[in-house]
């Protein structure tokens, strides 16, 4: 079961440019534990994903994301936490949901 994440920005944050719709945001139990252990917020990784940052993707995968934005294809990101644990962030092709998860939870 995954937790639904509230992505409301607080008044101290600067909005980041979002290049595509994210839909509902979900966080798997493993990703939640990993973020708590690293002291990082899910919002940081959502923002990076929404800006289409390359993160841990190959050149080919990053180019695929750039191509996919206006084609309604799945968008996939991979980032490492401060503790060097890889997280995946996946937005569904229909833009109904974005999930943060560990690769082992896929």
Image (tube, rainbow, N blue to C red):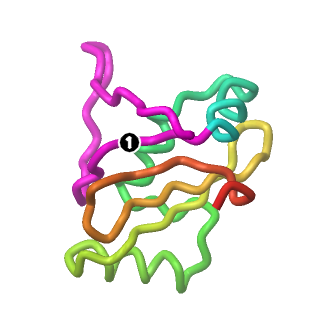
Magenta part mainly helix, strand or loop? loop
Q: Residue at x 23, y 81 (%)?
A: 71
- Would residue 105 be found to the left or right of residue 97 on screen? right
Magenta span includes 8: yes
Task: Give the magenta-colored segment's residue range.
Answer: 1-28
Q: Nearer the viewer, residue 25 or 52?
A: 25
Secondary element at image label 1: strand
Check the picture and name the quadrant holding the C terminus. bottom right
Q: Quadrant of residue 57?
A: bottom right
- Would residue 4 be found to the left or right of residue 34 on screen? left
Q: Nearer the viewer, residue 3 or 42?
A: 3
Residue extending farthest bottom: 60
- Would residue 38 be found to the left or right of residue 2 on screen? right
Mark 1, residues whose alpha carbon is within 10 Å: few (<14), some, or many (≥20)?
many
Q: Residue at x 40, y 74 (%)?
A: 65
Task: Name the residue tied to disc 1.
Answer: 25
Picture coordinates of residue 4 (x, y %)?
A: 42, 33
Q: Is residue 26 above or below residue 69?
A: above
Residue extending farthest top: 11
Q: Residue at x 72, y 29 (%)?
A: 38
Magenta span includes 5: yes
Picture coordinates of residue 99 (x, y %)?
A: 47, 50
Q: Is residue 14 above or below residue 75?
A: above
């Amino acid at each position: 079961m995954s937790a639904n994440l509230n992505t409301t920005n607080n008044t101290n944050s600067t909005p980041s440019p979002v290049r595509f719709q994210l839909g509902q945001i979900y966080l798997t139990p493993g990703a939640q534990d990993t973020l708590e252990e690293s002291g990082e917020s899910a919002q940081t990784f959502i923002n990076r994903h929404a800006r289409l940052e390359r993160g841990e993707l190959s050149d080919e995968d990053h180019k695929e994301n750039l191509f996919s934005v206006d084609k309604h294809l799945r968008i996939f990101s991979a980032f490492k936490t401060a503790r060097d644990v890889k997280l995946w962030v996946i937005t569904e092709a229909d833009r109904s949901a974005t999930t943060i998860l560990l690769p082992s939870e896929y």
